[in-house]
């Protein structure tokens, strides 16, 4: 095959063939390996595009002493790139590291990925070829960056041309790649692979945020990593939750270290997610008090809601769904309402469904407002209410479930306890 390649080169470019045939390794056994054929074929291919480039390729000082597999691949990649863009191929071929042989492998990989970008999207190829860090030779990190864009364009498992176009237009890629930025690009690659499996466009969505477009800091890289983690463990049932979180205003305007802690908590919830709290995961990000930024007190509220959902278990998912829809939950939880949720959580954890007949409670469409009321023994009314599985309180629960209480009504005897002091029903609210 080598002789055939030389014969073709002789017919088409006689002077170039004489120069090539004069290499010392052409007259030794070292010259008959596959790399020799590949090297001569590359010089011939370059000549079909640009004779000046072919002459240049054949003149490297690392050629006369023998051609290695890496050198043969490098010549082939440069020649292939020349078929798309002779200017950038000549610039890479004349870069200092390539001429000296020090960065042959990196430049070869970069040229190969740039050719791939040109094949998939010529316009994007021209944009990437114009990056200043491409023209002056390609380093190891820069070759990885070109691989990332090429992979997003052509990979069978993670292709997303729109994401490739968006990332390639960001200044932090165009003006030179730092160690943090290459990690961000690697993160987007892994992210896209998961997103492709989930049918999510989350990576493209995040890539459009201003805090991603204007450069990647270490803190922002960590935020991207958390979103990759969230999507990776979400599963088909909950990946919509991750999309909801990514769309929250406090994510769109930049993720602070404190907000990264929020993402970490979301990750913990997703990791433990089963069918029972899918409802919680879908509903929680839609609340206005979550979307506008989450305070410490609001995180306690969210955690309490999650704990109640977890305690409810699969058998009581309907209870969780109804709880999440109540307006006093959706508009933000007061400390008293938080207290009620804690009691509900304890009830759900400690009592069997049959003891409290929770399906019956749900079917009656009720939920107690979380405010205290007096009991004759001086106990906490809400706490006693949620412990009515105990025999001495069963009558209290029955009356509460059936009493037609209304706002402002004197309910001194309305809770089945004629000894209780009159209290306004403002203090004991039911939602029907």
Image (tube, helix red, strand yellow):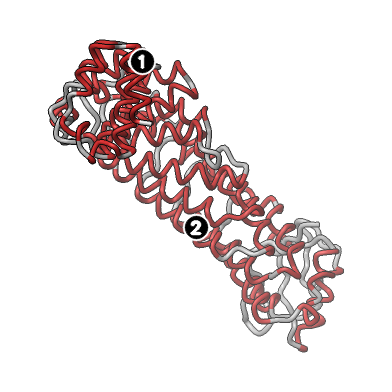
**In which quadrant of the rendered image does the C terminus lie?**
bottom right
Structural crowding at the residue carrying mark 2, measured as other residues with C-alpha within 10 Å and reported as few (<14), some (14–19) or many (≥20):
many
Residue 85 marker: 1
Residue 58: which numbered mark, if any? none
- Left or right: residue 199 versus residue 92 is right
Badge 1 marks a residue whose secondary structure is: loop
Residue farthest along the bottom direction in this orientation:
391
Q: Residue at x 28, y 31 (%)?
A: 74
Disc 1 to disc 2, how far (Cα)?
46 Å
Q: Residue at x 47, y 23 (%)?
A: 119
Which quarter of the picture shows residue 147?
top left
Q: Is residue 68 above or below residue 389?
A: above
Is residue 424 visible from the viewing direction of this image?
Answer: no
Q: Nearer the viewer, residue 144 or 49?
A: 49
Work out whether residue 347 or residue 212 is closer to the camera in this orientation and state it.
212
In the displayed structure image, the side of residue 351 where residue 73 appears, left or right: left
Front in this rendered view, residue 60 or 328: 60
Mark 2 falls on what kind of element? helix
Above-or-below relation of 72 to 418: above
């Amino acid at each position: 095959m080598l002789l055939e390649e030389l014969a073709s080169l002789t017919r088409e470019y006689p002077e170039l063939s004489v120069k090539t045939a004069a290499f010392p390794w052409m007259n030794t056994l070292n010259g008959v390996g596959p790399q020799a054929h590949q090297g001569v074929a590359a010089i011939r291919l370059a000549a079909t595009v640009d004779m000046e480039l072919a002459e240049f390729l054949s003149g490297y000082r690392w050629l006369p002493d023998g051609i290695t597999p890496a050198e043969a691949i490098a010549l082939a990649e440069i020649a292939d790139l020349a078929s798309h863009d002779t200017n950038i191929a000549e610039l890479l071929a004349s870069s200092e590291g390539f001429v000296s042989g020090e960065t042959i492998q990196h430049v070869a990989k970069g040229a190969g990925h740039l050719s791939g970008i040109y094949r998939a999207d010529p316009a994007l190829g021209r944009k990437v070829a114009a990056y200043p860090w491409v023209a002056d030779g390609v380093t190891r990190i820069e070759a990885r960056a070109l691989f990332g864009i090429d992979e997003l364009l052509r990979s069978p498992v993670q292709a997303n041309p729109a994401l490739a176009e968006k990332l390639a237009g960001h200044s932090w890629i165009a003006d030179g790649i730092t160690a943090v930025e290459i990690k961000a690009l690697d993160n987007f690659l892994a992210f896209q692979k998961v997103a492709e499996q989930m049918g999510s466009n989350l990576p493209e969505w995040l890539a459009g945020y201003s805090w991603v477009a204007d450069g990647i800091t270490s803190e922002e890289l960590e935020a991207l990593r958390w979103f990759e983690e969230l999507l990776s463990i979400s599963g088909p049932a909950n990946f919509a939750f991750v999309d909801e979180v990514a769309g929250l205003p406090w994510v769109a305007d930049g993720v602070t270290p404190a907000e990264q802690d929020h993402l970490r908590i979301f990750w913990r919830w997703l990791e433990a997610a089963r069918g029972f709290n899918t409802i919680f995961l879908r509903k929680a990000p839609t609340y206005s008090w979550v979307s506008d930024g989450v305070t410490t007190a609001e995180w306690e509220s969210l955690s309490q809601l999650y704990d109640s959902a977890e305690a409810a278990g699969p058998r009581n998912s309907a209870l969780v769904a109804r709880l999440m829809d109540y307006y006093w939950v959706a508009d933000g939880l007061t400390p008293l309402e938080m207290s009620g949720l804690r009691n509900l959580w304890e009830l759900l954890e400690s009592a069997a469904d049959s003891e409290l007949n929770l399906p019956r409670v749900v079917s009656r469409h009720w939920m107690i407002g979380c405010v205290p009321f007096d009991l004759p023994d001086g106990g906490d009314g809400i706490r006693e209410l949620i412990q009515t599985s105990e025999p001495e309180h069963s009558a209290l629960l029955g009356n509460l479930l059936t009493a037609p209480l209304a706002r402002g009504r004197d309910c001194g005897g309305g809770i089945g306890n004629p000894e209780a002091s009159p209290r306004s029903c403002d203090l004991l609210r039911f939602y029907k």
